[in-house]
Image: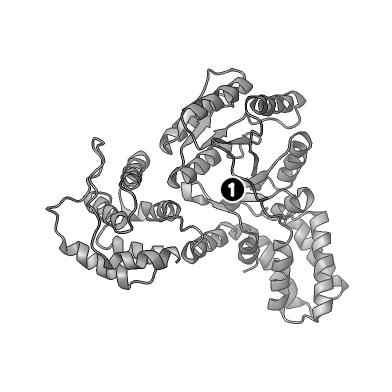
Amino acid sequence: MGFFSKIKNLWKSDPQETIEPPIIEDKPSAPTETQDKEWQARLRQSLAVAEPRLSIWLNHLLQGVDSKGDLLWQRLYFFFDALEVPKKEAEDFVAGFAKWLDDMGYTHLEEFRSELQYRMALALDLEDEEDEKSRLFIKLSHGLSKTKAQLSRQIDQLLSSSTSFDQAFWEELEEILIMSDVGHKAATELVQKLRTEVSGKNVEDPQEFKQLLGKELAGFFPRPKKRIKPDPPEVVLMIGVNGVGKTTTIAKLAHRDRMKGRRVMIAAGDTFRAAAIEQLGIWAERVDAQFYAKSHGADPASVAYEALDKAVAAGTDVLYVDTAGRLHTKSGLMQELKKVKSVMQKKRPGTPHRTILVLDATTGQNALSQTELFAREINIDEIILTKLDGTAKGGVMVAIALQHQIPISFIGLGEKMEDLRPFDPENFARALLS
């Protein structure tokens, strides 16, 4: 039985044991026995007959709520109680969300509704439901608006002005792709595949052509490899040059894990850049992750080594190890990165379990160069591409995927916690060409 089918019946049952408030000073209160039960009965009934989608349920849940406060906390406790969410998990969720609102200075519903839905989707394991997929597609399409303006518009103009798929058409299409930072090699290969498809299927309709283009485009991206889940802690090494958004990306990854109930530690392995340790510490506190750091100028390898000890002792589920924003042209710094990996492997064979390269999409072909230079020195398991919402150079993703065959696991579509989303090649192609 699926999640929505299972919990649909819970709305019709009697409420479970009332959740008491977490014992945290100045934090939201849970419902009490003396609380009016009429709104609970009305809300339970409206949820029972509502379309089983998280956004629809939230519309009912938040009816009459316009700001943070007791009414919001009561509704959230009722919702989790009805879904038989364990008491401690519900308390942690509500207390954590209240703290985040205080940290961000948010008061009104329109400021935090989207983040609330994102957190609930993660906590209830609903990110793959159609409702969240649709929400992500809208965000993705909006985030790619600058790249779309460059690529999709020009392809539409080419299709409308061409009377046939002749040599001139294919040459102009290749030029459009190259100018959109897809890269010469990827553009050439994509055009060759399309020519074969169009010729074999006798395509004449522009929409059918765009569907074929989207299919071929999505096929360029390798899928993440299936991995056996390691004994905790899972160790993730984060690499990338300065300015790509690595610190905030670590925070967003940690946030996702925390919303899924995982215990997280962040290690400040960038001991060279001024204020790097302090910035990461602030983010760790915001996302409720444990934090390990040494003094400025300390050996990054020793930070990773000791953090692994601390993570094991604390029963941590995942350890994110930050590294300096290494100038990829400096062989000494690359050697230092190798040393960090080597030390962890000696400490615990098999670590790091994943090495993630963070790239800034706004740099276009420079992102491709960074991938090449890092990959030459160290094995990269995944790529996260940030700042897609601020560039017309999103086509570089295709070049990176084709030339290096490294999966892109997440993309950054903005500054908020919810703006780091799993990458889906089909959605990317559809949003780009829509």
- Image quarter where the C terminus lies is bottom right
Nearer to me, 244 or 136: 136
Q: Is residue 145 left or right of residue 402?
A: left
Asked if 113 appears above or below 235 in the picture, the reply is below
Residue at image x 16%, y 50%?
32
Amino acid type at image mark 1 = Lys
Dot 1: few (<14), some (14–19), or many (≥20) neighbours within 10 Å?
many
Q: Which quadrant of the figure contains the N terminus? A: bottom left
Residue 275 appears in the figure: no
Q: In the picture provided, is 292 more to the left or to the right than 429?
A: left
Q: Residue at x 42, y 33 (%)?
A: 285
Q: Is residue 220 visible?
A: yes
Q: Looking at the picture, does residue 182 appear above or below residue 201?
A: above
In the rendered image, residue 72, in percent from the top left (x then y), is placed at 26, 53
Coordinates of residue 404 in the picture (x, y in percent): 77, 48
Q: Which residue is mark 1?
A: 387
Place residue 189 in its image quadrant.
bottom right
Q: Residue at x 43, y 39 (%)?
A: 287
Towards the viewer: 396 or 115:
115
Secondary structure type for disc 1 = loop
In the current view of this chain or complex, which residue is farthest to the right? 167
